Amino acid sequence: MSGAGRRRVAAVILREGSVLMVRERGRGDSGRHDGPEYWTLPGGGVEPGEDLEAAVRREVAEETGLRALSVRRSHEAPYPSGLTTCFRVEVGAGEPVLGVDADLECACPRMVGLVWVPVARSAPDGPYMVPTLLSPAHP
């Protein structure tokens, strides 16, 4: 996870009390993506000239195969790879399908799975407490 300072976006996609997260592998000692696994919200870097809403729509499509129906800015979160603007994203029907990293320097996959992670509500009628990044010790 490099690029600290690069502008990022992330999608909070909720369904039936769970948030969709991407299971990824970090770089190991070999320089390949064979290091520790972690889970993160679907998202990534903003391309030059791209606005934040367009970036989150693109990232949702690339990483999950889902189509963003509506996008609403939620909050900012620090990530190891840079400040991230998180959006609440409503998606079309269907199950997510893991995308493929097209911009990696190596042929090894960074994204290795999609996981629906149950989230808790802060109160019975309150908002969901959504994680933005989880280590393997906290699936």
Image (tube, rainbow, N blue to C red):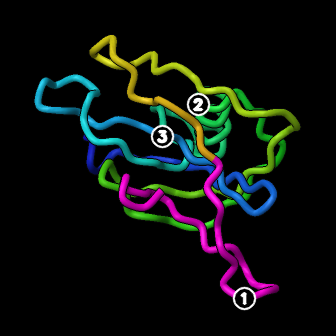
Please tell me whether residue 17 is drawn above or below residue 25 in the rendered image.
Answer: below
| 5 lies above or below 43 | below
In three-dimensional space, the C-alpha distance between marks 3 and 1, rounded to whole angstroms, equals 28 Å
Residue of label 2: 63
Prevailing SS of the magenta stretch: loop
Q: Do the residues labelled 3 and 1 touch (CB within 8 Å)?
A: no
- Cα–Cα gap, marks 2 and 1: 31 Å
Q: Name the residue carrying label 1.
A: 123
Position in image of residue 119 (x %, y %): 64, 67
Label located before the other in sequence (2 or 1): 2
Image point (86%, 38%), residue name = 92
Residue 114 % position (x, y): 59, 37
Q: Tag 1: residue type? A: Ala
Could you give the CA–CA distance between mark 2 and mark 3, rounded to whole angstroms? 11 Å
Q: Residue 23 carries which label?
A: 3
Label 3 is placed on what type of residue? Arg
Q: Residue at x 42, y 61 (%)?
A: 138
Q: What stretch is highlighted in magenta?
A: 116-139
Residue ranking furthest to the top: 107
From the viewer's side, name the closer residue of 8 and 101: 101
